């Protein structure tokens, strides 16, 4: 129930974001994050834990939508992929730090440490320019040009980009309120379908199930230092995401997604087969030990291949392809779909692992294979194109 309430709040808030200042929305969303962590840290019963998770989930839900949209709107097309991927790289670094601190500090102290980034974020946002495209949509021409000039550099000629953005705003009539009927048009429902599909498939491949229950998985594989192994898995994810950040604007989004999802499928099939063999072996046999090592190798391969494409590119593409005049409504729907799927995977992963570890990874492998087919059939290449060019192509 808590999860569904959280997702409903996220939907309402992200609708509000489309008609408000992006940076102001980030600033407001940081407040419940801080309060949520403090509620968890100073809790005396389970009710405060629920309240803390609800507040934190709300804040993270809003931030996870606003940040990639802001990055896409302020980035030049030749750097948009790299800068967009930095967002996911930052997420993985934060996850790794949480794993590391969790080895040495009490969970109450860890919760206080979790509030520090948002405490820093609030004053930091005063020094960041507002999105030029949002300002143009609101008809604030002088502010729009000034913000774009700051972002591109005072020695840069921005006249061509200014004309493109103005033309896009005028042609789409971005000031009008958009409802569900607008989403029935192909130029709206198709990019929305692509965005929701990618975000749901990345979660249904089981990545959060692997990380949230990695200790359990490693223990079932016979790894004694499971906590250390989990930290190592987080470190590998950071390195692989760093490589993806470099490749996004060079190899292209679509190619990375295809390679990533195909490689994920093979690594998950490998892990599933290893666990099937291990389940039939005696715990004190050499075969059991070998299978334990191979399962770790397969999981590492899965994390690497996920991070190379499906980890960061879906959020990037979502922020690029949604038309500006429906970005609030459609973006909130895509974000809601992502976090609802995350909740579903988190809820079911432990139950599936108790049922059958090999069977669980077989299911995840099937989803990864569907991801590859989905990308091949529906996902366009957005590398090197302006947001206006991408959205007009639909």
Image (spheres, grey):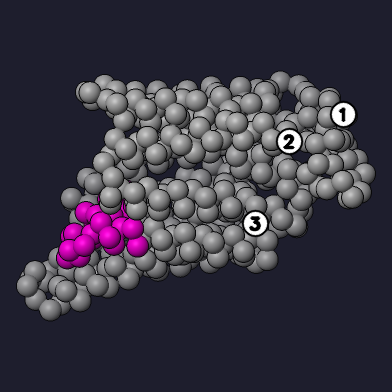
> Which mark sits nearer the N-terminus, 1 or 2?
2
Q: Are marks 1 and 2 in contact (CB under 8 Å)?
A: no
Instruction: Residue under label 3, please give it.
Output: 82
Instruction: Residue under label 1, please give it.
Output: 141
Marks 1 and 2, how far apart at CA: 14 Å
Q: Nearer the viewer, mark 2 or mark 3?
A: 2
Work out whether residue 385 or residue 66 is closer to the camera in this orientation and state it: 66
At horizontal 46% and vertical 52% (from top left) the residue drawn is 92
Q: Nearer the viewer, mark 1 or mark 2?
A: 2
> Which mark sits nearer the N-terminus, 2 or 3?
3
Task: Please tell me how crowded label 2 is: few (under 14), some (14-19), or many (20+) other residues with Cα within 10 Å.
Answer: some
Marks 1 and 3, how far apart at CA: 28 Å
Task: Please tell me how crowded label 3 is: few (under 14), some (14-19), or many (20+) other residues with Cα within 10 Å.
Answer: many
Q: Position of residue 353 (x, y in %)?
A: 22, 52
Q: Position of residue 146 (x, y in %)?
A: 85, 35
Q: Are marks 1 and 3 in contact (CB under 8 Å)?
A: no
Q: Is residue 309 above or below residue 325?
A: below
Q: Is residue 83 left or right of residue 272?
A: right
Q: Is residue 193 left or right of residue 99?
A: right
Task: Please tell me how crowded label 1 is: few (under 14), some (14-19), or many (20+) other residues with Cα within 10 Å.
Answer: some
Magenta residues: mostly which secondary structure? Answer: helix
Q: Quadrant of the C terminus?
A: top right
Residue 129 — which label?
2
Q: Is residue 311 above or below residue 304?
A: above
In magenta stretch: residue 217: yes
In magenta stretch: residue 315: no
Q: Which residues are magenta?
A: 209-232
Q: Position of residue 111 (x, y in %)?
A: 35, 36
> Which mark sits nearer the N-terminus, 1 or 3?
3
Q: Position of residue 253 (x, y in %)?
A: 63, 59
Is disc 3 placed on a helix, strand or loop? helix
């Amino acid at each position: 129930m808590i999860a569904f309430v959280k997702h409903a709040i996220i939907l309402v808030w992200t609708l509000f974001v489309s008609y408000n200042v992006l940076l102001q929305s980030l600033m407001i969303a940081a407040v419940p994050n801080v309060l949520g962590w403090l509620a968890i840290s100073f809790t005396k019963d389970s009710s405060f834990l629920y309240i803390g998770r609800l507040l934190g989930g709300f804040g993270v839900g809003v931030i996870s939508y606003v940040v990639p949209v802001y990055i896409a709107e302020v980035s030049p097309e030749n750097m948009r992929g790299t800068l967009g991927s930095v967002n996911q790289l930052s997420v993985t670094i934060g996850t790794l730090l949480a794993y590391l601190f969790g080895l040495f500090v009490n969970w109450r102290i860890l919760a206080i440490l979790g509030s520090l980034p948002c405490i820093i974020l609030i004053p930091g946002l005063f020094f960041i320019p507002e999105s030029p495209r949002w300002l143009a949509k609101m008809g604030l021409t002088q502010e729009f040009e000034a913000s774009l000039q700051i972002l591109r550099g005072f020695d840069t000629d921005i006249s061509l980009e200014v004309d493109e953005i103005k033309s896009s705003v005028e042609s789409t009539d971005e000031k009008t309120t958009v409802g569900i009927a607008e989403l029935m048009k192909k130029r709206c429902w198709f990019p929305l379908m692509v965005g929701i599909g990618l975000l749901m498939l990345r979660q249904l491949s089981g990545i959060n199930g692997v990380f949230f229950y990695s200790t359990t998985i490693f223990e079932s594989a016979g790894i004694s230092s499971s906590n250390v192994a989990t930290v190592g898995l987080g470190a590998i994810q950071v390195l692989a995401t760093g490589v993806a950040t470099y490749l996004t604007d060079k190899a292209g989004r679509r190619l990375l997604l295809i390679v990533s999802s195909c490689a994920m499928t093979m690594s998950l099939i490998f892990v599933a087969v290893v666990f099937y063999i291990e389940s039939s072996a005696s715990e004190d046999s050499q075969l059991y030990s070998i299978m334990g090592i191979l399962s770790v190798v397969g999981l590492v391969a899965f994390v690497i291949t996920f991070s190379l494409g499906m980890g960061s590119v879906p959020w990037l593409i979502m922020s690029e392809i949604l038309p500006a005049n429906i970005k609030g409504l459609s973006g909130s729907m895509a974000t809601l779909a992502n976090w609802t799927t995350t909740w579903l995977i988190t809820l079911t992963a432990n139950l599936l692992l108790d049922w059958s570890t090999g069977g669980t990874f077989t299911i995840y492998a099937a989803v990864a294979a569907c991801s590859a087919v989905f990308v091949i059939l529906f996902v366009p290449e957005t590398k090197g194109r302006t947001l206006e060019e991408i959205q007009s192509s639909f």
